Amino acid sequence: GISNLHLQMQRLAILIILLSVALPFLWSLDANLLLLIYDTYVAVGIAHHHHHHHHHDNELRQRRRIFPPGSTPTLEGKTIWITGSSSGIGAELAIQLASAGVGHLIFSGRREDKLESVADSCREASSEWRTTMMIPSTTTTTADDDTTNSQGTTRVSIVPFDMSAGSDILDKSVSTALHLAGPSGIDILVLNAGQYQCSPALDTNLDAALPALVNVNFASPARLSQKVMQMDRWKERGHGHIVTVASLMGRGASPLNALYSASKHALRGYFAALAAEERSWLRVDLVLPGATDTGLWSGSYDAAKASSAGASSEERGAIAGGNDDGGQQQRDNSGKPLHADDRSKMAVGRCAQLIVSSMIGPHFLFFETWITRNPGLLWVYLASCCPMTFQLLTNVLGPLRTAMWRKSGEDALYVPTLLRQLWGCVVDYASGRSDHLLP
């Protein structure tokens, strides 16, 4: 009996040790496992936007790769059009693509001054890449220059337009982008523009918010992609590549984000179906980021007031939406500005790096990628694999998040904050101060 107990105690001790190692490791993951492995060991070195770390990052990545240079795919020489690239994920993605030796980058967004600033950063990143790769120096072309560039320099063009604008503006913008791209056309279209929204469904003015958010987050990207495919004759050419930046909230219902979540479900559903229909020639990558450290919350849609400034803004930020270029700050009922704890957010450079790796990688592995710190990663795994557990958690989180939003305007994403709120509810219920366990 004693030896049996001793054996059981040994097994329990081994289990505790294994869990104490495994749980922190799993909690530290910031993307789905296949993408993490590919990014770490296979993808060609991408320098971060922190230029003073550039050489160190590049050397580190070169050492980490298990395949020799030249044996894995790259984006060198490609023409890529990115919408919503004046700030947030789009801007960082542009800079990292310039660091990957892309041939021609076309940027779109509402704010031309911000686009010019991103273009300057891209030229700098491109020249650093050229120096690192020891490619002879060439001159960069101006935004409006239509000449083809010599090998080695990322050419940068700007096509400013508002994603919430009408069909005529979209047509004109596609024509301009294709003219700048030249005879070879656009290789990759990155649909990154969008806008965040955070308020309870019944507090939201649907007459104003529904058409505005669905237009920016779903209808315009779908229309723009179709215009590019038709006007650039992708089907006739026999190849095309769309990167759709959706959101984790396009994978499961998110309390306090009913309208935003619905628009991202529509975006993901449309492009997943399109990819299946045209799989012989079209590649569609669905990128689902979680909370990222950008200007998302300051530029989110003011669903209660439905201000015209908020309705027309379109730059992408974290949780694949929002902007930081002049949309009216959303406020909750008490007039406090919407905010979220920075500790719950992913660094924008890391998010962009993982998107670039997924673009380079094989489509059968990266048709859909999840890029987020925990608990976002756990959230999307539960939504996809354990719907009953997900439903149970959502029913607990919904009242907690709504109560915190009403009290202080917080978009509560940070686990310790949510647990503290839950503990407060349990104490109130146990002491008789409240009749309900949840708000």
Image (cartoon, rainbow, N blue to C red):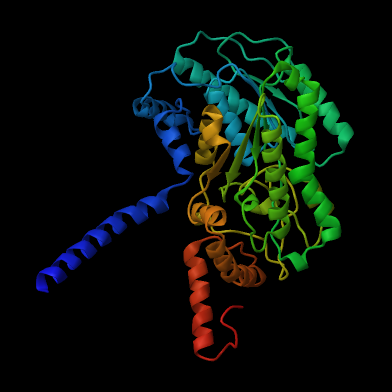
- Residue 412, above or below 363: below
Q: Position of residue 333 (x, y in %)?
A: 73, 69
Along the line of sight, which residue is nearer the eye, 129 or 170?
170
Q: Residue at x 48, y 70 (%)?
A: 419
Determine the residue located farthest toward the right in the rendered image: 168
The image quarter in which residue 160 lies: top right
Determine the residue located farthest toward the bottom in the rendered image: 432
State left or right for residue 99 relative to residue 155.
left
Residue 40 visible to the viewer:
yes
The image quarter in which residue 117 lies: top right
Along the line of sight, which residue is nearer the eye, 368 or 40?
368
- Residue 248, above or below 191: below
Q: Residue at x 69, y 48 (%)?
A: 264
Along the line of sight, which residue is nearer the eye, 342 or 253?
253
Along the line of sight, which residue is nearer the eye, 410 or 138?
410
In the rendered image, the quadrant that contains the C terminus is bottom right
Q: Position of residue 114 (x, y in %)?
A: 69, 35
Q: Position of residue 95 (x, y in %)?
A: 57, 29
Q: Position of residue 329 (x, y in %)?
A: 72, 55
In the rendered image, the quadrant that contains the N terminus is bottom left
Q: Residue at x 49, y 88 (%)?
A: 430
- Residue 247, above or below 187: below
Q: Residue at x 57, y 71 (%)?
A: 396
State left or right for residue 44 relative to residue 313.
left
Residue 161 visible to the viewer:
no
